[in-house]
Amino acid sequence: MAVLGVVYLALLVFVSSSSKQERYMLRLGIKWKALGEKVHNEQLQRTLNQSGLTLSAGKLILFRYSAALIYLALKVISGFIKQLPLSLSELLIAALILLVTSPNRYLPFGWLLAWLQRRTLIQKDGELISFIRLYENNRLRKRGYVQFGAFCTGVAAHFLHIRQDLYELSERAVDEGTEQAIEWFCGQFPAGHPFINDIRSILLATEGMDDDTEAANYLREQGQIIAKISSDQYLKKWSTIGDLATIINVIPSIATFLMIVSLAMQYILLIKGNFDGVGLFQ
């Protein structure tokens, strides 16, 4: 303990000046980042991105194991000062920290990530429908329409979850062509997505038509498909909210029923206490 104290004091003296402190923190940050890259998990990073969390998978993994190790270190130091051995329960608590923070879908944090992923996907689908609605209105304008790349750049700021995808879609439309850009954009959604293929077909067919009148007529014909997609998304969103609302509404009824059962049991025990010794309650 004395050696650790002297080392810590020497470190404070070493980084006492602002320039040395900045260089030390910079080197420490570089080492931390390099360690995070070594333990980086690509699948976990995709899950975090799909959940709408701006976290690094490497830093999350380091945080999990660091929390467990710091807890054990504190317990070891405390036991050393108090001259007590490390108990099995403290090891189990450290293991519990790793289990609770595990991204496995059957564990608490993994379940939270799965819920956030579903929620983000619903919001992303809603923004995609809004985008195709804006695209439809743009192409049906009587005084001319904005070109596809410029249109994507112009509407990207109005969205949250697909903003960066729209910016890159605009750049790819200029560099690689509209068809390749649309294929890339639709590829950012899961393979089993309910309506991304319809969006792909509408965008590719409309942008592939040279005649603006023909493209406008095609979009009017596809308006029913777009309306159905929007209606399905609305029902999907409110069905999820409805399930949650049903659970919330049922909780008071269950609590009331349990309270009635508890009062009945207390009443029976009260009667039993008043008639103690009667053969019926022996």
Image (cartoon, grey):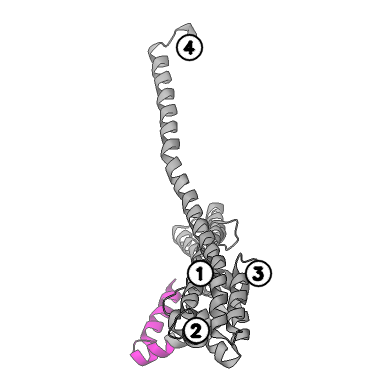
Q: Nearer the viewer, residue 34 or 203?
A: 203
Residue 56 colored in magenta in the image: no
Q: Is residue 188 visible?
A: no
Q: Horizontally, is 255 left or right of 219 in the view? A: left
Residue identifier under label 2: 167
Under mark 3, the amino acid is Ala
Identify the residue shown where x is 48% and y is 12%: 281
Q: Is residue 256 visible?
A: yes
Residue identifier under label 1: 129
- The CA span between labels 4 and 1 is 69 Å
Under mark 2, the amino acid is Tyr
- The CA span between labels 2 and 4 is 79 Å
Q: Magenta stretch: give its range.
A: 1-24
Residue identifier under label 4: 281
Q: Nearer the viewer, residue 248 or 195?
A: 195
Say few, some or many: other residues with alpha carbon within 10 Å of mark 2 (under 14 / 14 to 19 / 20 or more): some
Question: Which tag, 1 or 3, sits closer to the chain's start?
Answer: 1
